[in-house]
Each structure stands twice: as C-alpha cells, then as structure tokens.
Image (tube, grey):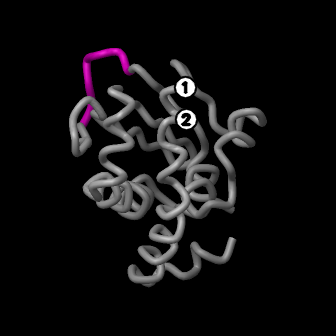
Amino acid sequence: MSFFNSADELNGTLGTFLQKAMAEPEVGKAFAGTNSLMKVVFTDPDVTLWIDCRQNPPIFLPGSAEEPDLELSMTADAGHRFWLGRLSLPVALTSRKIKVKGPTSKLMKILPVLKPIYRRYEEFLNDQGRADLVAV
C-alpha cells in the first residue's frame, strides 16, 4: 500500500513541505549552492517537481522547457521515507531507490542541511494531522 493515494495528496503534503523548507535561509542557501535546475520525478502516484536552485531562495516551477542539471527519480514512498530520514541518500543512490541523472556531487552539497529537515518534515506531518504518515 502506498503512503499517498493521489498526486494531489502527494503534492499537497510533500510538495508543500518542500516549498516551505526551501524558504528557510539555511536550506535555501544549500540548495542554491548546487546552482542547478532540478527535476524530481515521483511515481506511484506520479508527480514531477521542478526546483530552480540557481537562485536563493530556490523556487518551484510548474515545468520547464530547459534540460535539468539534476534529475532525481523515485517512488513517492521512497521520497517520503527519505524526507523522514529513514532512507539515507548514499544508501538510496547505491540501491537505486533514488536514481540520479547529472552530477551527484551537486546533490551531495545539500547533505549537511538534511538532518534538521527530517525532523521538520515529521513535525509538519503531525501539524497537518497526518501522524499516520510518520509511523512507517
């Protein structure tokens, strides 16, 4: 069973959280440090997020005609587990639970700011009345 029943639910939960996280100065600066256009493709349900990290704070785009500098692909469940801190980025990359097209070195630049974000995602879910998504 998937954690998210629809694209709207995934976008309204994880998408909303990521937009809020990018607005935080430390997080925005780390993502902007990649100087990349990121495309994040989730499956089951299908949602694609475009994040322009060539500016600070990064902004979410409805789409892009440009080729992304980094493209990450994963199931929605893997993305959810990742942001909860229950799927480490190095493990996810080597096990191919998260697939990356583009220089992974840019992606590794954000690792130092991730640990505090995991806790904030859990708090966000609880605040949204989605404690069911925390107990995975």
- Residue 65 percent coordinates (x, y): 25, 18
Looking at the picture, which amino acid does disc 1 mark?
Ser
- Residue beneath label 1, please? 105
Q: Nearer the viewer, residue 49 or 58?
A: 58
* SS assignment at label 2: helix
Looking at the picture, which amino acid does disc 2 mark?
Met
Residue in the image at 26% along x and 25% along y: 64
Q: How many marks?
A: 2
Spatial distance from mark 2 to mark 1, Cα to Cα?
A: 5 Å
Count residues near mark 2 (Cα–Cα under 10 Å), then give few for <14, some for 14-19, many for 20+: few
Q: Which quadrant holds residue 62?
A: top left
Residue 66 in magenta?
A: yes
The span picked out in magenta is 62-68
Against 71, is 18 above or below? Answer: below
- Residue 82 percent coordinates (x, y): 60, 54
Residue 117 lies left or right of residue 82; in this view the side is left
Identify the mark at residue 108; answer none if there is no mark.
2
Residue 113 lies left or right of residue 86; in this view the side is left
